[in-house]
Amino acid sequence: MQARRLKERIILYLLAFCALAALVTLLLIALFTLKEGLPAFREIGLGKLLLGKVWRPQREQFGLVPMILGSIYVTIGALLLGVPPALGCAVFLAEVAPAGVRAAIRPAVELLAGIPSVVYGLFGMAVLVPLVRRIPVPGNTGYGLLSASIVLAVMILPTIASIAEDAIRAVPREYKEGALALGATHWQAIRGVILPAARSGILAAIILGMGRALGETMAMIMVIGNSIMIPRPLNANPLTLVLSQARTLTGNIAVEIAYATGLHESALFATGVVLFVLIVIVNNLTRLLMRRRK
Amino acid sequence: MIRKTPMLTILLALALAASGCRPTPAPAPSPMPAEAEFSGKIIEAGSTTVQPLAEKLAEAFMARHPKVEIIVQGGGSSVGVKSAGEGTVDVGAASREVKDSEKEKYPDLVVHTIAYDGVAIVVHPEVPIDGLTMEQVRDIFAGKIANWKEVGGPDKPIVVVSREEGSGTRACFEELVMGKDGPLITEKAILQPSNGAVRTTVATTPYSIGYLSFGFLDPSIKGLVLDGVKPTVENVVAGKYPVVRPLNLLTKGKPTGVVKAWLDFILCEEGQKIVVEEGYIAVR
Amino acid sequence: MNGEGAATEAMSPPCGRRFRLLSPRLRQRIAFSLLWLAGLLAVVALVAVTGYVVARGLHLINLEFLLTPPRGGISGEGGISTTIITTLYLVALVVAISTPLGVGAAIYLAEYAGEQRWVEWARFGVETLAGVPSIIFGLFGYALFVMALDFGFSLLSAGLAGACLVLPTIIRASEEAIKAVPREYREGSLALGATKWQTVRGVVLPSALPGIVTGIILTIGRVVSETAVFYVTLGGSYRMPRSLLSGGRTMALHVYYLATETRAFEKAMATATVLVLLTIFLNLAARRIVGYGQD
């Protein structure tokens, strides 16, 4: 009996140890990234890093503003292009599609979510960049925010759609039946009752999509141009901003990490820290907004 | 970390002494002795320009000595210098001279120049310009000249393609074309992380211009005549083409064992033949 | 019904009045048409991306392509055999490292954990880790495994970094599977005199197995598709890895290198096609297994 109790205890401790694995990993990641980035924070200074507008490591200039803006613009673009179709798809699959159609489309959406990002990057290089290049604005190279946003939008669409659909389906049937009983049309029931009820789940889906957009690396460096300039309109028309080349925080790290030494390398780790903090802020900000609404 | 056994070094020393393959000019240099059986592992890292060449040289050496494993990695010239200097790899590759600051930091670094390489200015094949002056190239990359019509071409904006900082190719370009105290490469330039990526971008982006190593020239892009000189190996050897840099392999201290064998092979007739085949310039 | 519609019309804001003048039925028609469009958009996007890549790449795939190694150089000659092997090695390594830890964690969190402080922290760890972008795992792997522990660019470094990356995935999937096991199963087992662990091992885990296996398949899918993490920890060599400490290239990375550095764009498409087919296969396999579980 004692032996068995001992065995149970040991197993308990083993499993508890496993449970801590994720936390320990997270702490290790935080530790190492901060440790490597510390020289940059110390010697360059947080202010210069976050507010500096020029990134030329050879000249000891490590300003991250162009990359921060690049990441933000491309994510906003991806959300603008991707969220409406994604939500529409979610509502469609959950409420409107006949069972047969749903059985065909839902797996397709899930499949889209699993396709490697390089494939999207490849498609972007081969099809999107030449296509965007056709827009007749001088200075339009095809590489830039628009191509990157489209690629990202397609990448996050299945993620947002499937999670939002789950959220919509989770709304209790009584809500919908009650609305219909009161004389509402199906669409009115969706708009007035179901969607508001599913709001937190839908928001969670969008946040997840946003996180994926901010964190995407390889597909970005294939289509965004990786220029160090602050993205700006190509001419007097402010809309041409989308045609500007740019670089994301993730791309900054990936393109230069292999070549960087010393302070430069440390600055790239600092970029990683900034990226991580940005994602945490964005996630929690949206969660806050959601709580406010309630 | 040089992986070897003391026995092997002695064997090698004897074998080399007996063979007579030395990296000095000889009327008919003798080939590498095939009798000496080398084994072990060599890790090489650094310049992406040197990488394909190092791959081919590694393959050839490994074909002769199947027990040897040579691992070739990229990383860029700066990583090559650092890794070699700190001893984290056996051989570092750099497509540029070692900087003074690096020489100070790693005083044991030994430089072996295995080839010379020209850096060509390339444009998309449909650009109707065949040559430019150094000044024009400088102004284009600085962003001062922004339209092809300013250099005799069509009325189209110039798309500048460059390498990321830390690249040896870029360092060479900046030093010899932009000039040590010259203008900076425009911030609008599309940056790519390797010679191959520059080639792909220039080949597929109309009205683009970039620079890359001679070894990457191919029919998908057009090499420009610079100050009246064509970007060919002959012109580099003749000293006419101005943008040239050494391709260096670096070791921490004098190389021994299988590393030395590989380096000797590279500087040997057969090794240098491969160098020329790949589009670079032999050391002799 | 129309009265209801009229009431809402009277209260609606001035903007969009035109739309509101339409009957609710008509509005529904329009809305639903748009929704149909959105639904079809997902399919179109899927077909466009995968269809294009497969169309351009499929014809290059043959036994030779799959079984010969890449030869490097600008022309990108050769096949993709070494990349396939490297991918397989990496998958095996990541699954071997992350599954015991992940399933163990899931068991603890689902079966044993109370409301202690540290359990909250542990859960927080899982949630936060799931949100970390993959390039940061790459940086971490580079700093710790490649540099500090001196494993260099190797399968080992990449495997460890990859295991960290997928840990939240396997924990979540396993935890959900375990939680879904009906309470009666456990109670029955305990009533028969089994200990907690015996219950878990003999009753809960087997029931949760389909879900856990799905989690493993998700992990495999992640390793196959990931690029950023391995870009920074695996090195770029296209040769066959000879040991845990050798570097290499996964298929996904090979697509990247082929596309950006060589003339062999078609080969990049072909490799991408192999990836797409593999993804479809993994997806179908996961479905099948969950299907078995339903029985």
Image: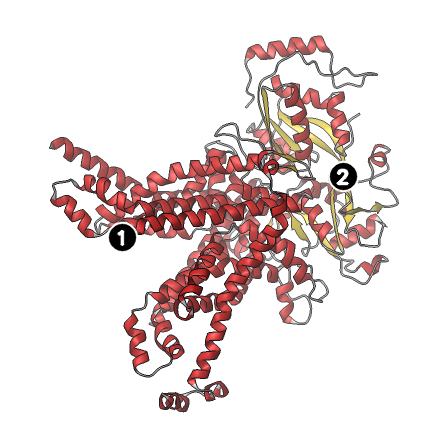
Which label was assigned to residue A242? none
Question: Considering the numbered disc 1 on the image, is that residue within a helix, a strand or a loop?
Answer: loop
Which label was assigned to residue C180? 1
Where is residue A172 drawn, in percent x and y?
A: 29, 69
Instruction: Residue at 63%, 50% (x, y): give it.
Output: C56
Is B24 above or below relative to A99? above
Is B267 above or below relative to A63? above
Q: Amino acid at mark 2?
A: Phe
Is C102 above or below relative to A107? above
Identify the subunit bearing mark 1.
C
Q: Tell me if residue A145 can be seen.
A: yes
Instruction: Residue at 65%, 28% (x, y): give it.
Output: B250
The image quarter in which residue C78 lies: top right
B150 or A76, which is in the foreground? A76
Instruction: Identify the residue position indicated by label 2 in the image.
Output: B214
Left or right relative to B249: residue A264: left
Instruction: Residue at 28%, 73% (x, y): give it.
Output: A174
Left or right relative to A239: residue A156: left
Where is residue C180 drawn, in percent x and y?
A: 27, 52
Image quadrant in which the N terminus of chain B is located:
top right
Where is residue A36 drawn, in percent x and y?
A: 48, 42
Question: Considering the numbered disc 2 on the image, is that residue within a helix, a strand or a loop?
Answer: helix
* Alpha carbon separation for disc pair 2 and 1: 62 Å
Q: How many marks?
A: 2
The image quarter in which residue B282 lies: top right
Left or right relative to B130: residue B53: left
Which dot, 2 or 1, sits closer to the camera?
Answer: 1
Identify the subunit bearing mark 2.
B
Is A282 above or below relative to C140? below
Q: Tell me if residue A206 can be seen.
A: no
Image quadrant in which the C terminus of chain B is located:
top right
Instruction: Residue at 84%, 53% (x, y): give it.
Output: B129
